[in-house]
Image (cartoon, rainbow, N blue to C red):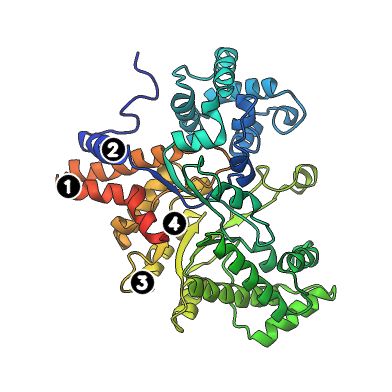
């Protein structure tokens, strides 16, 4: 019987198979947004068992297990790693239809050469097999990155980070990929979060300057951006629930900052004004540095307050938000473009209802001399599955230029998630191969093959200019 993960997995036409095997398969990876630990890369971490590398911190799997009623002790609790793995193995057969089923078996196949389906009966054998391999020197973080053919990694880092691990990585010739920081100043933007005032103290220490005014805050951000730039950073990132865009002067933003620092609550209207002005400041800063600005828009987070109090953030209680985006997005991009200070930008949406909004908005703010300056980002989080990624590519193609697309990213904390690039590439090739089979695109593999390779890697390499 043919293995579930086989050479032509997801490829449903001859054209798709040609595009994948001859053009996409061997392309290296440019992972321009992820949540891998620089410390674990720098220290060349090895893993004790498959649960440690596979289940720890994976809120995708945690959500699936909760839906099936698995006890929290076997998800994020104090149960043994073996018991947690068994609980996941029992869950896997019931995830058919969810990308987790395909991701799970793709990762087992590519990294551990396991062709068995993971279930309650096969769990113990697969546990011992994978654990034996993980003890070998080829399964450290640096070796997994090398095995995955990754050339560039952009981690996600707070402005107060010392970047000591990035410096260690840069000085280590054994690390085959270029590992660079990404500037994510969300904590300086989210003025209404309880920890805002405490964060100002941390930023003050990192920037080695006092922060008692809004001007000092902006200067501290500039200092930290310069520090990141020296360390090779060329990308920023913002995770925002909605995109704020309200008229606000520098004087008003400063007054709102002072109000918050005095301990007085800030209204929703004041919060939007402060965020709008600060994000525009950051956009101009990125433009001056030649950075790419990434906007991840649309997650409503920590919705289960009881579980948030028990487990903290990023534990699987976030979901898709609904809101109006078109006016704010066009207004934000226009405000930066009007003074010729619009940086390269990638807009990611979590709600698919915004696909057409983003796909059409980016066409308003392109620039001569830059291929795809403003990008519609790949399907993200809840949308990084076959339907979500296909819809994003279809809408980008219909309203813009698919061939200028910078492609996929892992957005993951797991070193085994590089198979998501393979998953994306197979879906991309099946999508474009379908055009060829249907007579909607020519059977010209020189042309379409180049487009595939550009989306897989070349466009991102040229776009980020690292």
Q: Which mark is residue 446?
A: 1
N-terminal-most mark, 1 or 2: 2
Query: Which label lies toward us, 1 or 4?
Result: 1
Residue occupying the point 48% across, 78% down: 336
CA distance for labels 4 and 2: 21 Å
Q: Secondary structure at mark 2?
A: helix
Query: Which label lies toward us, 4 or 2?
Result: 2
The residue carrying mark 3 is 366
Query: Which label lies toward us, 1 or 3?
Result: 1
N-terminal-most mark, 1 or 3: 3
Label 4, residues with CA under 10 Å away: few <14, some 14-19, many ≥20: many
The residue carrying mark 2 is 20
Could you tell me residue 450's position as x and y percent? 24, 49
Seen from the viewer's position, the closer of residues 131 and 309 is: 131
Residue occupying the point 65% across, 38% down: 57
Residue occupying the point 71% across, 48% down: 313
From this view, report whether residue 418 is shown above or below residue 90.
below
Q: In this orientation, does residue 356 appear? A: no
Q: Which mark is residue 166?
A: none
CA distance for labels 2 and 3: 30 Å
From this view, report whether residue 56 is shown above or below residue 214.
above
Q: In the rendered view, does 397 fall on the left or right side of 208?
A: left
Q: Report if the CB atoms under discs 1 and 3 are less than 8 Å apart.
A: no
Which of the image's four quarters has the C terminus?
A: bottom left
The residue carrying mark 4 is 377
Could you tell me residue 160's position as x and y percent? 69, 61
């Amino acid at each position: 019987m043919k293995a579930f993960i086989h050479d032509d997995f997801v490829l449903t036409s001859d054209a798709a198979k040609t595009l994948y095997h001859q053009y996409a398969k061997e392309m290296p990876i440019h992972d321009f947004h992820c949540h891998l630990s620089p410390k674990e890369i720098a220290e060349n971490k090895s893993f004790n068992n498959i649960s440690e590398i596979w289940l720890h911190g994976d809120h995708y799997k945690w959500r699936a297990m909760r839906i099936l009623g698995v006890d929290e002790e076997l998800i994020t609790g104090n149960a043994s790693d073996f018991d947690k793995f068994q609980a996941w193995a029992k869950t896997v057969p019931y995830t058919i239809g969810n990308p987790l089923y395909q991701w799970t078996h793709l990762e087992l196949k590519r990294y551990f050469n396991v062709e068995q389906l993971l279930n309650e009966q096969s769990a113990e054998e697969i546990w011992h097999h994978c654990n034996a391999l993980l003890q070998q020197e080829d399964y450290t973080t640096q070796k997994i990155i090398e095995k995955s053919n990754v050339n560039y990694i952009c981690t996600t880092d707070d402005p107060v980070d010392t970047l000591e691990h990035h410096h260690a990585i840069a000085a280590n010739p054994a690390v085959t990929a270029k590992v660079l920081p990404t500037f994510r100043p969300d904590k300086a933007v989210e003025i209404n979060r309880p920890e805002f005032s405490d964060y100002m103290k941390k930023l003050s220490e990192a920037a080695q300057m006092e922060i008692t005014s809004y001007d000092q805050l902006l200067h501290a951000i500039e200092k930290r951006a310069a520090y990141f730039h020296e360390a090779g950073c060329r990308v920023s990132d913002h995770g925002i629930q909605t995109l704020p865009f309200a008229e606000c002067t520098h004087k008003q933003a400063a007054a709102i900052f002072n109000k918050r620092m005095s301990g007085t609550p800030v209204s929703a209207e004041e919060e939007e004004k402060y965020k709008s002005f600060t994000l525009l400041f950051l956009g101009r800063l990125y433009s001056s540095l030649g950075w790419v600005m990434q906007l991840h828009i649309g997650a409503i987070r920590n919705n289960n307050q009881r579980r948030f109090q028990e487990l903290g953030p990023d534990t699987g209680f976030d979901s898709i938000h609904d809101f109006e985006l078109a006016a704010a997005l066009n207004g934000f991009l226009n405000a930066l473009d009007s003074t010729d200070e619009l940086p390269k930008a990638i807009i990611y949406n979590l709600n698919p209802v915004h696909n057409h909004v983003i796909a059409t908005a980016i066409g308003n703010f392109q620039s001569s001399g830059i291929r795809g300056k403003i990008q519609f980002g790949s399907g993200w989080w809840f949308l990084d599955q076959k339907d979500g990624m296909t819809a994003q590519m279809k809408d980008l193609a219909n309203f813009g230029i698919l061939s200028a697309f910078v492609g996929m990213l892992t957005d993951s904390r797991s070193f085994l998630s590089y198979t998501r690039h393979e998953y994306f590439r197979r879906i991309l090739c099946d999508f474009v191969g379908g055009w060829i089979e249907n007579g909607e695109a020519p059977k010209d593999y020189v042309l379409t093959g180049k487009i595939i390779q550009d989306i897989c890697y070349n466009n991102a390499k040229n776009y980020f200019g690292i």
